[in-house]
Image (tube, helix red, strand yellow):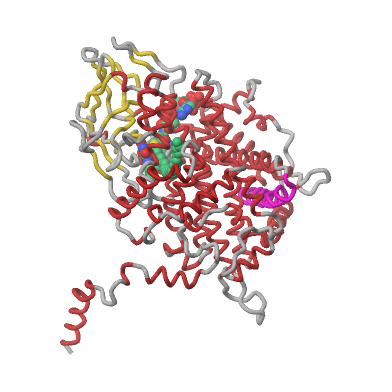
Amino acid sequence: MPLNHLIRDGDNPDITEERQKATFSTEELAIEIYGEPLAQRRREISAEVLKRPELLDDCPHVFLDRTTKVENSMKKTVAVMEKGSEICDFTSREELGHLVCEVFGDDGFPLSIHFVMFLPAIQGQADDEQAEQWIPRAMRLEFIGTYAQTELGHGTNLRALETTATYDKRTQEFILHTPTVSAYKWWPGNLGKTANYVIANAQLYIDGKSHGPHNFLVQIRDENTHQPMPGITVGDIGPKFGLNTNDNGFLRFDHVRIPRRNMLMRHSKVSADGVYSPPVHPKLSYGAMIFVRATMIRMLAHVVLKAATIAIRYSCVRRQGEIKTGNGEVKILEYQTQQHRLFTALARGFAYRLVGDEVKNLYEKIAEEVKHGNVEQLADLHALLSGMKSIVSYDSGKAIEQCRMACGGHGYSHASGIPEMYAVEIAGCTYEGENMVMLQQQARYLVKGIHRLAHGEELSTMLQYLANTSNNKFRIGESGVDLENALILALEYIARSTIERVTARLDSLQNKGLSAENAWNENAVELTRASRTHTRLWIARCFRDRVHRIENHAIRSALTDILELFLTYEVVDMSQYLYQGGYANSDQVAQVKDAMYKLLEKIRPNAVSYVDAYEVSDTELRSVLGRRDGNVYDNLLKWAKSNPLNRTEVLPAVEKHLMPMMLAAKSKL
Ligand SMILES: CCCCCCCCCCCCCCCCCCCCCC(=O)SCCNC(=O)CCNC(=O)[C@H](O)C(C)(C)COP(=O)(O)OP(=O)(O)OC[C@H]1O[C@@H](n2cnc3c(N)ncnc32)[C@H](O)[C@@H]1OP(=O)(O)O
Ligand SMILES: Cc1cc2nc3c(=O)[nH]c(=O)nc-3n(C[C@H](O)[C@H](O)[C@H](O)COP(=O)(O)OP(=O)(O)OC[C@H]3O[C@@H](n4cnc5c(N)ncnc54)[C@H](O)[C@@H]3O)c2cc1C
């Protein structure tokens, strides 16, 4: 039995040769990533999807116009909902998530915000009676919901949202109103044409007093006719950089009345006679955002690993140029530059995917505590997720773009699948809190950490390294200190010294009389850097702990190579910080680089097997370059020929416009 279970007849021999070199079982690595029985269930689901034409695209969806894309995705949604339970266990988020990825790819599941934000908002913020009233109906898809928070004028600064929800004691109703154009809800996914209910975030007013933003369940379209309800103006905001199958929408309320019990009341309450009870923590109404920030890490990692799958497989069937003259053209993956681009993307993908599991588990634990009124760990979680969503979205975007460029010209074609992946993934830098803003949310927490330390107060586990001032010299190559430990300590130093430096600067400016706000803004760039270094350290530590827990020796060894590549790359990328304070010298940094280049060589024979083990099917990948069988060129030709522009030899537009011009030019001779 070959160690790579994907070897099949008819595959491109160049890719088969790669699979024969595997030093670990790809099946066992798949089990390590997904767990059992999910690894097997995913394969069964993929095989079932292939048997059902109603779940497959008739043609590559990049050839379709937006209206047809939207219609296709709605048609497939019905097929999934009608037949999906024969294929997968609908109660398993993982299985359903996999089915959705197979059928819709990255771009267009019309129920995504229903499942990812609307339902979680109700689950986390509705009281038991409300949950009982709304969740079963939402789960049965009697209606479709979305999360309408962002407005035309404000997305980041939630305290400035303009939509109002004014309590009318007389009728025991809230009146939802959009007072200005800038108060139009703008961006919510699936709002434009799909949803008939929204969770609307609006400023709560009782007796003329504002109590800040709260969440309200509002019907926006009739459940039977789908026509907008009275007082509602709603539509699609138009084409975007990516995610064009999604109908992100706009929404206006004109004095829309909803029953009092449509305010989500697990944490904040308004009694019938208009008495307001605040939540135990002022930010509990931000719970749905916290959920998405925790969930999106794995989603973003998934996109990086898909892009790496495509670029690594393609780099083994693409031959271009010679390394040694006369020895023939080599697979482009033999070039060190290609390995550096792609294996570091692979390493980030694995790191974010496995750390994403840990983040999800931590979120679930803390969310359960919050549900029961214990908000002790909410600040830690908010800080962690603010940093994680920013680092993972940005660094994943960079990795995907490297994968695209590593495919040369064909990477720029939609046939590669990577341009769409990039467009979808990079949105993660903006949604759920713009990255610069979220990094600064985390920076507040870090600066507080240094102040707590100065006052002799206890630090949370996440920040305890700030107290380790004896870590002041790079220990790479010292006896008794292995590479991993030396690198983690270096990352600790980078984070600690960056946070200390910016905090000292903030304090000194304030001591000189600058206001806290101005001092903050004068240091904002450095604060975001401090936040980045802290998050990158957290990811590195968490990834290392995850790899160390692996029991299967061959799999642990395979992932140790990936871990060490990840650590060396992170340290080299941030090496300028190591020179500050004399922690390291240039010879030591060169040692880290040498270790990194050796790891590229070590990973090279297993490259295809790593991405094979991540097991993304061809159906989901939607990439000619990334095909499992490596038969790229014939299929690129087929793909180009099936393009609608090639349906006629002479385009009607050419006949109508260009030919008369050319004929007229000739007649002038
Ligand atoms: C059944 C199976 C089902 C299967 C399912 C099948 C699966 C299907 C899979 C399908 C695939 C789908 C793919 C599509 C994915 C696309 C999804 C895209 C979705 C995108 C959605 C969005 O895009 S939706 C809008 C997000 N919009 C923001 O994200 C606004 C950012 N803006 C803020 O978030 C606040 O505006 C901001 C800045 C914090 C300031 O808030 P602010 O002014 O109120 O507060 P201050 O800054 O004054 O902070 C005062 C103190 O509050 C602390 N604090 C702040 N927030 C806190 C918090 N959350 N928790 C705790 N503490 C918090 C802070 O740390 C301070 O603490 P301290 O005082 O101790 O320092
Ligand atoms: C694909 C996509 C899907 C989305 N889905 C939804 C959805 O389902 N529901 C929903 O409600 N919303 C949704 N959004 C909206 C999204 O959450 C917001 O766009 C996001 O929170 C950023 O807010 P903004 O657009 O107001 O950006 P702005 O805040 O206007 O950002 C513009 C620039 O100003 C800077 N800036 C702003 N404030 C500060 C500050 N305090 N300090 C420093 N710099 C600052 C930012 O860093 C950025 O560089 C979606 C957006 C996208 C792109």
> For the N terminus, which image quadrant?
bottom right
In the image, farthest residue toward the right:
479
Which quadrant of the render holds ligand 1? top left
Magenta-span inclusion, residue 559? yes
Q: Nearer the viewer, residue 590 or 243?
A: 243
Residue 498 visible here: yes
Is 346 above or below relative to 168? below
In the image, farthest residue toward the bottom:
669
Is 55 above or below relative to 117? below
> For the C terminus, which image quadrant?
bottom left
Is 303 above or below relative to 155? below
Residue 408 location in percent, x, y?
A: 50, 67
Q: What residue sits 34% from the left and 47% below the top?
A: 246
In the image, farthest residue toward the front:
86
Left or right: 470 in relation to 429: right
Residue 25 location in percent, x, y?
A: 68, 54
Magenta-span inclusion, residue 423? no
Residue 516 visible here: no
Left or right: 282 in relation to 553: left
Residue 271 location in percent, x, y?
A: 32, 12
Is 17 above or below relative to 138? below
Q: Nearer the viewer, residue 404 or 62?
A: 62
Q: Which SS type dominates the magenta stretch?
A: helix
Q: Nearer the viewer, residue 109 or 82?
A: 82
Tell me where residue 381 sits by quadrant. Answer: top right
Q: What residue sits 22% from the left and 72% below the top?
A: 652
Q: Which residues are magenta?
A: 552-574
Numbered label tally: 0
